[in-house]
Amino acid sequence: MRIDILTLFPSMMSMFFEESILSRAQKKGHVEVFFHDLHDYSLTRYGSVDDYPYGGGAGMVMCVEPLVNCIEDLQKQRSYDEIIYTAPDGEMLSQTLCNSLSLKGNLMILCGHYKGIDERVREHFVTQEISIGDYVLSGGELAAAVICDAVVRLIPGVLGDEQSALSDSFQDGLVAPPEYTRPVDFRGWKVPDVLLSGDHKKIAQWRYDQAVERTRQRRPDLLEE
Ligand code: ADE
């Protein structure tokens, strides 16, 4: 997979990709991530990328030209499966959406700032708009990082133990069951006996029952779906 991220703050973004699973996925060749600084595509000598909104009002709007210059430059080099815009009014990010994005080849992600981007970019270039929650961030960079993290770990081979992505919360419509590791007894708080039994069938049944019970308590909406 290749991901191109268009942003006003490439240095803010890069740190997410230099550690842990996202870094390992790049080193192992499962994903390539490129950052593009929209200031480099500005029409003005000063690299300006935003302007006042037509019709007035507070805040600035990201201009159409730097975004379109950068998008078309990239499109000349390859075709994109999706051009994603991170926005609070987009489709809510879900495990189902992450699963489907993890199967794509080339993704482009546009990060908005200020009051957002000129609507004409959304109309004519963006193919998918994604929100990471019902709150407003000051920019799309954190949302882009969340999307990349959630998607890249699903690419086969990225996680050491491929099973572990399949047993994540939400992957089967349930939240994850509790997990324990050593020591078996900490201050008298013991690991459930069944997990020490070595009986894989019993353990699987216990985990499933726990997942259902936790989902009922914490996210009953998932069971209704
Ligand atoms: N940009 C600003 N707020 C956002 C949100 N909640 N999700 C995605 N992108 C955003």
Image (cartoon, rainbow, N blue to C red):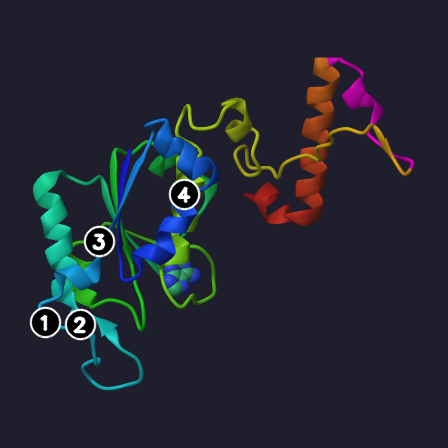
Q: How many marks?
A: 4
Residues under labels 1 and 4: Cα distance?
Answer: 32 Å
Residues tagged 2 and 3 counted as in contact (Cβ below 8 A): no
192 falls in the magenta region? yes
Residues tagged 3 and 4 counted as in contact (Cβ below 8 A): no
Q: Amino acid at mark 2?
A: Ser
Q: Amino acid at mark 3?
A: Val
Please give the residue where the numbered disc 2 appears in the rendered image. Answer: 48
Residue 19 image offset from top left, x and y in percent = 45, 41
Residues under labels 2 and 3: Cα distance?
Answer: 22 Å
SS at mark 2? loop
Q: Quadrant of ligand 1?
A: bottom left
Residues tagged 1 and 3 counted as in contact (Cβ below 8 A): no
Please give left or right for residue 92 compared with residue 193 in the image. Answer: left
Q: Residues within 10 Å of mark 1 (few under 14, many from 20)?
A: few
Please give the residue where the numbered disc 3 appears in the rendered image. Answer: 126
Please give the residue where the numbered disc 4 appears in the rendered image. Answer: 18
Residue 203 image offset from top left, x and y in percent = 73, 20
Please give left or right for residue 32 compared with residue 71 in the image. Answer: right
